[in-house]
Amino acid sequence: MLEVRGLSKQFATHRAVHDVSLSVERGAFFSLLGPSGCGKTTTLRLIAGFETPSGGEIWLNGSRIDGLPPFRRNVNTVFQSYALFPHLTVLGNVEFGLQHAPVADAARRVRQVLEQVQMSDKQSRKPSELSGGERQRVALARALVLAPDVLLLDEPLSALDPQLRKQVRAELKALQRQTGVTFLFVTHDQEEALALSDRIAVMRGGEIEQAGTPEELYQKPETRFVASFLGEMNWVSGVGIRPESVCVARDPGSNGSLPGRIAHTTFLGPHRLLTIQLEGGEVVTAQTAANTAFNAAESVHVYWDPSHELRFPS
Amino acid sequence: MTRLRSIFAMPAAVLMLVTIAVPAGIVGVYSVLSRGAYGGVELPWTLENYTRLIDPLYGGIFLRSIALAGAATALCILLGFPLALFIARSGTRKNLYLSLVILPFWTSFLIRLYAWMFLLRDTGLINTVLQWLGVIHQPLPLLYNTGAVLLGLVYGFLPFAVLPIYATLEKLDKNLLEAAADLGARPIAVLTRVTLPLCAPGIAAGAILVFVPSLGTYITSDLLGGSKTILIGNLVQNQFTTARDWPFGAAVSIVLMIVAVFLMFTVRRRGEELL
């Protein structure tokens, strides 16, 4: 189990991480989610040992590790750029870590992990001869072969093209289940975080804004920032309402529906988004079935179940 | 675009042709002619200048020159690599240290060699100070030997080793060093397993830049080596001046050039195999 207590990192000119506390259960898929510059990567680098914290503690399985150099921490990193050694083959990269801490069954472990990431047949290639997806798998294998207590992943999917990203996302999740290794995953992509994680910590300005399961964060966001950052959100008279909770009708309902006009519709395959200009001037997006009967420029009324409204102290 | 690029390359190409290819061609022609009575060259054509080189006397000079240039190269790399590493990791002071490395070029190499003579000779600064301190009673033989030549070569060509190594270290992806540490490599293992192999092209370039001019040097051995250390460069110089045997001097030059080019390609091929 990984525990971070009151972790801070002050750089010369700015405060990158401030009083971050989180605890990651063994075997969990935990994501740090936030926009760029929110401190998520710095948090990861502090746990890996590449940066020295200005304050706070990092505990791993009951021992304090924040004073140890990276090569003494049983955590391994998958870098955003993968950072594969260009002068070594796939096999050389995967074996690299085992040469510094000799283990009895090294050869078997290398073979097994190369099979797990389906790179056995390409083990004598150099990184420059691999595709982006293959490099990512080698980076995973190189770290996983050391059986880390926690695997740190710094936006490992961002270098892949969008087509590949969803497929690799599924493979990543499967690999995590298969190996049972704790994953600490850094991403700015809320969809990625929602799809993969057991728990998510949303970061903003170096601090954790809210941590919880994907469902909790999506359904019960505690701040406006979290509500806006995860999924789509309409803001009507200071109240948040998700597009899928907005109902659209031609006639005014009995319980105070809002009149408006459909500005445009967006077809998204499984469903369609209606962008509705309310008479009060605000704009609301409603998610409807793909074969909805509504058309652009139509006058409509929108309403929703008040229990779906999200309110935040401002 | 290709045409524009070739136009840009023209001035340098012409300069290289006129100042390198043409003189080398002249030297090549001279090397197969006969010696003129008062210097210069005469017909008939002959290969005798090359066959004379088989004499063990000249073989010894070649071997000694190669050994000395090799030692100078090894020392320049051994001293230059840590220095380049230090500069590359110096953050904002990098440019200051780099200009310090280049600073000696602001003074003529000849003047700097005279400065070394002033330091090393029997009545020079080092011997005077050591005698004054009572450390020694007889002056140490610091000048006019092979050691002094080696010192002069290392001193003169060290920047040529530092700069290309620095350039590769500077380009080195910092993530690779972090990745190595992350995978359990201690700092020394990071150096030998990642930094050094990835620096091989810079080290090879530095080695060539030191080795080739060291092999042909004559000023350094002339001034610091006295008459004891005859190198290829001095041999060539002697043939063109005191010995007045231009064709033989030209033949020695051609062989020197072939040796240098051969060694350069060998080093480069080995470097490419490594990567």
Image (cartoon, helix red, strand yellow):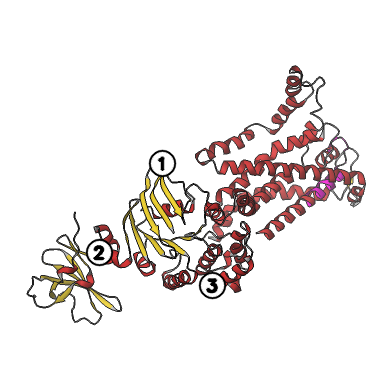
Is the N terminus of chain A in the top left, top right, bottom left or bottom right quadrant?
bottom left
Q: Give the label, 1 or 2, closer to the camera.
A: 2
Please indicate whether residue B135 sits to the left or right of residue B192 in the image: right
- Give the distance between the C-alpha atoms of the residues marked 3 and 2, in whole angstroms: 37 Å
Q: Main secondary structure of the magenta part?
A: helix
Subunit of mark 3?
Answer: A
On the image, numbered disc 1 is attached to which residue?
A12
* Residue at the far top in the pictured view: B132
Q: Which class describes the residues within 10 Å of circle 2: few (<14), some (14-19), or many (20+)?
A: some
- The answer to whether residue A37 is seen in the rendering is no
Highlighted range, magenta: B240-258
- Numbered disc in front, either 3 or 1: 3
Residue drawn at x 11%, y 64% is: A280
Q: Which residue is mark 2?
A: A220
Which is more toward the observer, B227 or B206? B206
Percent across and percent down for residue A137 are 52, 68
Residue shown at the point (50%, 66%) measured from the top left: A136
Secondary structure of the residue carrying tag 2 is loop
Residue behind mark 3? A116
Q: Is residue B204 visible?
A: yes
What type is the residue that disc 3 sits on?
Gln
- Quarter the C terminus of chain A occupies: bottom left
Whole-percent x, y for residue A276 in the image? 17, 70
Asked which quadrant contains residue B65, the reply is top right
Asked whether the residues under marks 3 and 2 belong to the same chain, the reply is yes
Host chain of mark 2: A
User: For the residues tagged 1 and 2, is the chain the same?
Assistant: yes
Give the mark nearest the N terminus, 1 or 2: 1
Does mark 1 fall on the same chain as mark 3?
Answer: yes
